[in-house]
């Protein structure tokens, strides 16, 4: 895949950007917002592609905005798109990032690496007392 051009990247919310706590908003997944910000800064277009709608959707969009992420479109291919029966509901994107991928969620560190060709600098989690027994 040619990653030099700008991509349209569709991203799921629950279980992908944040831990799945639907209808609540879970804790951000490790390195999710850092990766999304990097992609956003590189000029890729981010689309939020989620099952959420209405108030729950607004909460998710606001949560991302508060964390510095602005979506090009939400649950649509482009901002003005109006879903009717004469068009497919599937959105147009180059890449889909979703925790329901076959094979499971690969993690934001790996996503960062694939999309930027750089190795992420993820701070190591401090070891707690109980980690001694793992
Ligand atoms: Mg999900």
Image (spheres, helix red, strand yellow):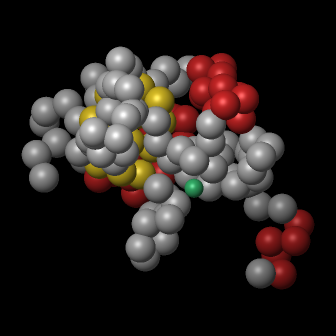
At a point 62% along the width and 37% down the height, the residue shown is 53
Q: Give the total number of marks visible in the rendering.
A: 0
Task: Write down which quadrant ligand 1 falls in.
Answer: bottom right
User: Residue 3, position in %: x, y?
Assistant: 16, 42
Is 2 on the left-hand or right-hand side of 117? left
| Residue 126 appears in view | yes
Is 123 on the left-hand or right-hand side of 85? right
Q: Decide which of 74, 112 is in the foreground and name it.
A: 74
At a point 43% along the width and 76% down the height, the residue shown is 103
At a point 89% along the width and 66% down the height, the residue shown is 129
Task: Examine the image and state in which quarter residue 56 appears.
Answer: top right
Q: Decide which of 131, 10 is in the foreground and name it.
A: 10
Q: Decide which of 119, 73 is in the foreground and name it.
A: 73
Q: Quadrant of the C terminus?
A: bottom right
Q: Spot the residue most to the front.
A: 85
User: Residue 121, position in %: x, y?
Assistant: 47, 44
Q: Spot the residue most to the right.
A: 129
At a point 50% along the width and 65% down the height, the residue shown is 100
| Residue 67 appears in view | no
User: Residue 112, position in %: x, y?
Assistant: 38, 47
Query: 57 above or below 62?
Result: below
């Amino acid at each position: 895949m040619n990653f030099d051009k700008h991509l349209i990247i569709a991203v799921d919310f629950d279980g992908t950007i944040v831990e799945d706590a639907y209808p609540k908003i879970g804790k951000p997944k490790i390195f999710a917002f850092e990766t999304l910000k990097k992609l956003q800064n590189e000029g890729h277009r981010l689309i939020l592609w989620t099952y959420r709608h209405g108030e729950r959707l607004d909460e998710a969009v606001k949560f991302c905005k508060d964390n510095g992420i602005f979506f090009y479109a939400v649950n649509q291919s482009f901002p003005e798109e109006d879903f009717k029966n004469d068009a497919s509901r599937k959105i147009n994107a180059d890449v889909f990032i979703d925790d329901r991928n076959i094979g499971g969620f690969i993690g934001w560190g790996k996503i960062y690496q694939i999309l930027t060709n750089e190795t992420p600098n993820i701070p190591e989690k401090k070891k707690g007392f109980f980690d001694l027994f793992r």
